[in-house]
Amino acid sequence: MNGRTNVVVVGAGFGGLAVARGLADAPVEVTLVDRNNFHTFQPLLYQVATSGLNPADVAYPVRGIFQRQRNVRFRRATVTGVDWEAGEVTVDSGDPLAFDHLVVAAGAEVNDFGIPGVAQHGFPLYVLPDAVHLRNHILGRFEAADADPAAVDDGALTFVVVGGGPTGVEVAGALVELIDKVLHRDFRGSRFDVRRAHVVLVEMLDDLLPPFRPGSRRYARSTLAARGVEVRTGTSVAEVTATRVRLGDGTEIPAHTLVWAAGVKAGALATALDVPTGRGGRITVAPDLRIAGHPEAFAIGDIAAITAGDGSLLPGVAQVAMQSGHHVATLIQRGVVGEGDAHAPFRYRDKGSMATIGRRSAVTELGGGIRLTGTPAWVAWLGLHLVYLMGFRNRVSVFVNWAWNYLTWDRGARLILGSGEGERGTTSTGSDPEA
Amino acid sequence: MNGRTNVVVVGAGFGGLAVARGLADAPVEVTLVDRNNFHTFQPLLYQVATSGLNPADVAYPVRGIFQRQRNVRFRRATVTGVDWEAGEVTVDSGDPLAFDHLVVAAGAEVNDFGIPGVAQHGFPLYVLPDAVHLRNHILGRFEAADADPAAVDDGALTFVVVGGGPTGVEVAGALVELIDKVLHRDFRGSRFDVRRAHVVLVEMLDDLLPPFRPGSRRYARSTLAARGVEVRTGTSVAEVTATRVRLGDGTEIPAHTLVWAAGVKAGALATALDVPTGRGGRITVAPDLRIAGHPEAFAIGDIAAITAGDGSLLPGVAQVAMQSGHHVATLIQRGVVGEGDAHAPFRYRDKGSMATIGRRSAVTELGGGIRLTGTPAWVAWLGLHLVYLMGFRNRVSVFVNWAWNYLTWDRGARLILGSGEGERGTTSTGSDPEA
């Protein structure tokens, strides 16, 4: 082609973007490929799901992100596999992508652990359409209760959130806020009692937020409880139907909504690559993040089984994806330029964790033993996210929405739209030749 | 129920909202019903379709709009018919809605005039999902060209817009802007030549913008042409397939996109009501907008055949909907209170027309012979829309997006998302009990 080293990066999530950005000054051509033409800021998906933000506020067109980085091209496609011999990534549309180096950053999938009914009836929260679908469903349940108040007895307004990690805690906290502060006004005068809406947070372990210290965990639990969330730890889910959730202890909860935030596993691509994988199907990597048996390829982020210093697996969080992506970019550049250790091991630096519980309430644990709770933690959380988002042009509307929401409790994103909903009032189906 | 007069308003568009707002001080209970839980600001749909605005920027939750108006309730449902004897509106979910007065404001549907292929392959632009679907398709065609440049020869980047009225003109103008100013940068370095993208505007009559004066029409035509739109007047469409558009003169254009902005007819509800209808299936109304044979019911806006002073039918535009809605509210209030002429005829006051052609370019004709073109017209157009939108809280993000777009040409809404697109990378289908 052009004599330059071709680097193909599969996935435009936190990891893939870090690799592409990290190679800005390297003498390589980067091709970033993703099934969507946008990057999703996943930490805020729970806000989309609870009508706090609009979908477009957390989605950034990849072509726009790299408009000024001349050595990055983008291909919108779903990767179907890798032809290792030919050194090509095969895709569902168009020509395969030839590579000299490959970085697999395709992320994870929801893991239902084989529990009956979760796949068919559960609402995951891992990608943007999940959040839109869940939002439409939540609002739809309130509309359904308004149309037929008897549905409330059947569980229309009972929302079970499974998973006591940051995602589950954030969803549960934001959901009670949506119900208490906003929907209660939207449905004033309706034929059902909004106060019957109920949120249950279910966690299999004995406590919420495992990565956090006891003080933070207690704060999160008591804050959620004070806001009306029924917290059930040491509880598992045995089965899910469209209207019922059966717990491990035999209890059956009438509920039309089960949010599944209980775990992920490696994305399907890990299996398709025919490479060694470890726990959760995650790709086995060497200390320098190279894929076993394929020295020209790396795996990073949620799809990779990256071992920490103590032998444990690193969690599938944004920090790990970003740092591992940056590390791989460094190694590739060193290898191409011929300077430095192109096989240096990856060392993860845990900079802390944050989780919000609601308005002006969060838990934050940073390096150096700094632990915050309540409003200071929420401010730190907000600040960090704003700094990250500032890196993306045109995100002013996100801040405006947030500011408005904070001042007025008015969650403007209360639309039942998208994910197939919102009928077109026409006779035309407008079919798409590419569908 | 409560002894107060019940007014049911079918449709939360411009007309329905005007009725509900107009009855704010009347001793009545208003029930507004719509298949969507949001009102759509239709004049800006073409901006959503061309990635200038996000869907949520032009959609306003109805419950939010009427939060402070105590005598308005909302029901999200699709109206299936009216039981005139029982005085009830039947809906697809929940109990029927009893009324003392009924206002039918259900709007229009796209009219394909029976032209083969339009219903299956055309992209209308009447409701919000239409705009999202069209946007995704347009962006998708560019991605498809990037994956396989040969598709360009097949018409992947040829966009035919049918209809030379304001909607068609606005779409065509915004589309060339999107291509020339934004997508050309997004697809820099791609394997196809963005300059091959082409917009054709087809109009059956001999000129564009029939409601405007010759000076405005000439301006619109020359401006579009100067910006690269191929304007074909006196041309009709004979047939449409997924990849070809055959014109009335036999010419065949390879094109993967046909935007159908050529006409509407009354919504299906008009037929279901079993009342006299006129041209285009629109409901026949008396001078006071009452439905023939049903003195307790009114029809307004696009679904009604409202006659102007000169005997012609009023067009299906926002002004007509708003004024007719306000008139009906006045009549209902007079009837309930027992003061004033509850059968006063409706008199439409044409306050002028506006159409944008692109950035800083529009045609505006206001009352009193004021005619503007170019930047002044665009400013007037912008100002009028902002004033209208100001009436809706939480629309600050719209202004911000617009301002950003104006300053930077960066259309931030370049997402392929919604209307079923955007795969969920999980094994769960998250099925919805209400689906």
Image (cartoon, coloured by chain):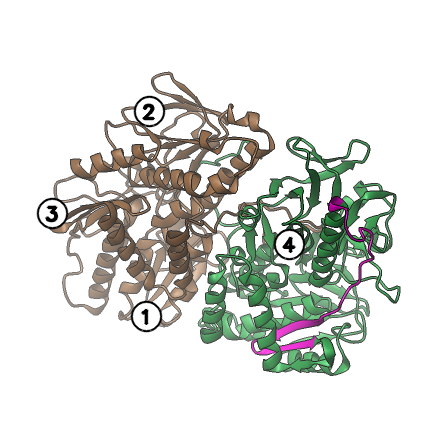
Chain colours: A brown, B green
The mark lying in front, picked from 2 and 1, is 2
User: Which residue appears farthest toward the left when viewing the image?
Assistant: A368
* Residue type for callout 3: Gly
Residues at circles 3 and 1 in contact by the CB criterion of under 8 Å: no
CA gap between label 2 and label 1 equals 53 Å
Q: Residues within 10 Å of mark 3 (few under 14, many from 20)?
A: few
Res B204 → quadrant: bottom right
To which chain does the residue with label 1 belong?
A
Q: Is residue A237 left or right of residue A93?
A: left
Whether callout 2 and callout 3 share a subunit is answered yes
Q: Nearer the viewer, residue B306 or A237?
A: B306
* Residue B395 seen anywhere in this rendered image of the structure: yes
To which chain does the residue with label 2 belong?
A
Residue indicated by mark 4: B127
To which chain does the residue with label 3 belong?
A
> Would residue A323 be counted in the magenta stretch?
no
CA gap between label 4 and label 2 equals 44 Å
The mark lying in front, picked from 2 and 3, is 3
Residue indicated by mark 1: A4
Residue drawn at (43%, 48%) of the image = A48
To which chain does the residue with label 4 belong?
B
Q: Could you tell me residue A384's position as x and y percent?
A: 26, 56
- Disc number for residue A369: 3
Q: Range of the magenta residues?
A: B336-365
Q: Earlier in the sequence, mark 3 or mark 1?
A: 1
Q: Earlier in the sequence, mark 2 or mark 3?
A: 2
Residue indicated by mark 2: A236
Q: Secondary structure at mark 4?
A: loop
Q: Could you tell me residue B134's position as x and y percent?
A: 60, 58
